[in-house]
Structures are given as C-alpha cells and as structure tokens.
Amino acid sequence: TIIYGQRNSILDGEDVHAQIVEMFPDLVDEALLGSVDIDKPSVDWDVEKINLNLEDKLFKKGTNFVTKEMCEDIIYEELRQKVLDDVVARYDEKKQQIEELGLVFADIERSVLLSVVDHAWMQHIDGMSDLRRDVSTLAYGRQDPIVAYKKIGFNMFDEMIARIRADTASVMLNMNVDAFRAMVERINRQRQEFMARKEGQKAEAEKQPAKSDKVVGRNDLCPCGSGKKYKNCCGKEE
C-alpha cells in the first residue's frame, strides 16, 4: 500500500526534508482560513483570533506574530506569505541549531514522519474496522452497504493523509531538542532492525538452489549440493 511503501522508504533512509517543507503552506492556510474573514477589510480582522489559531500549531504561545498595524492594509495572500516566510525561516534556524548540537536533522525528520505515519495508520485501521462493523446500519440513502463502505473509506484515507501532513509539520516546528534526540534513537533502532531483516531475507533467498529448466538424470549429481546421485537423494521417491 501507499503507507507501507512510504514507511519502507523512510526506513531505507530517504531524505524527506523537501516533503516536510511542502507541508507548511497547508498548515498556514488551515490556521488563517479558520480565523480570517476575507469578506471584511483587513483592518476589521480579529487579530487575537488569528494569533490564537497560529499559536495552536505554528507559533509558540504568546508570539502574537500578527499585529493591528500589519492588518491595516493587507490582503489575505500577503498575510499568508508573511506567515509562511517566517515559518520557513524559523525551520531553517532550527535545522542549523540541531546540527550544531551534533544531531543529524535528516534523521529527526525521518523519525518524526515515521512516528506520525505509524500513529495515523493505526488509527485508520481501527476506524476502518469500526466502519466495517457499522456500515450495514448506516442510513446512507439507498446505496449498497459495500458502495457506502468504499466511499466513506476513501474519505477517511484522504483525511488521514491530511492529518499526517498537518501533524508532521506541527511537530517539526514545535518539538524541543530532547524529544528530537529520543526520536532519533528510536528510528535508528528501527532502521537497524529493518536492515537486519532485509539482509536475513536476502541471505535466505541466496541459500535457495537456482531453478533450472535442465532435466536432471537419475545418475547425475543431485542439484541440492549433497554430493549424492539424484536417484539416491531428492529423486529417491520418483
């Protein structure tokens, strides 16, 4: 599935920095669109409400990034860009600070994304189990229960993806250094276990005798490598 493919890519060491930075605009829009009344002049916008929404996931409490002066003559797109520019700049600063402490920021990004994906996926599986149990009782018009199940399931999957993006972006912007360090240690253990399993599977596959279209004669050496004639080994029952 998409989720397992993404998870394996993270464990394989894929760089997810650009992927995470691309999550920020959606989080900014979510915060602003829930507090900015674009039908009103900017001077009438509720600055306190805007800052509360921004500080819910993007800024520290009490930052008060948006001011009355800022909203005297501005349109939504300009405010959105100011917020986004500040978010990206702070993220770059955090990256530099973390690396100065000797931590690998790319490992932190992978660790956070993996943790969020795992949590969201488990919640999604639980939700789909509940849906499978309850769908026959849903008053879903005249739709077939299977059709209803698929339709609701697709919507739930889209919601999960959106939640992964929002939660990952928020965690990366707000988590402290000690928490980052613990997550790096955890993902490093998971990567070691993952790579060990891959190596074990590879070694097991290499042990298997190569398949051949050649017909083995009864007096030929057995292809299993025992050193015996085929008729006295794997071909004894033929």
Image (tube, rainbow, N blue to C red):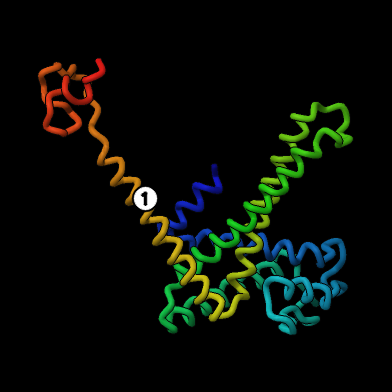
Residue 142 as seen in the image, left or right of residue 190: right
Name the secondary structure under disc 1: helix
**For this rendering, which residue is in front, 83 or 174?**
174
Picture coordinates of residue 58 (x, y %)? 67, 72
Q: Residue at horizontal 52%, vertical 75%?
A: 182
Q: Residue at horizontal 54%, vertical 45%?
A: 2
> Badge 1, how many Cα within 10 Å: few under 14, some, many 20+?
few
Residue 128 as seen in the image, left or right of residue 205: right
Residue 190 as seen in the image, left or right of residue 144: left
**For this rendering, which residue is in front, 52 or 83?**
52
Residue placed under numbered mark 1 in the picture: 198
Picture coordinates of residue 135 (x, y %)? 80, 36
Q: Amino acid at mark 1?
A: Lys
The N terminus lies in quadrant? top right
**For this rendering, which residue is in front, 82 or 162?**
162
Picture coordinates of residue 155 (x, y %)? 72, 43
Q: Residue 192, relative to residue 225: is it above or below?
A: below
Q: Residue at horizontal 62%, vertical 69%?
A: 171
Name which quarter of the figure residue 52 lies in: bottom right
The C terminus lies in quadrant? top left
Q: Residue 205, relative to residue 12: is it above or below?
A: above
Picture coordinates of residue 57 (x, y %)? 70, 71
**For this rendering, which residue is in front, 194 or 19?**
194
Q: Residue at horizontal 10%, vertical 18%?
A: 219
Number of marks? 1
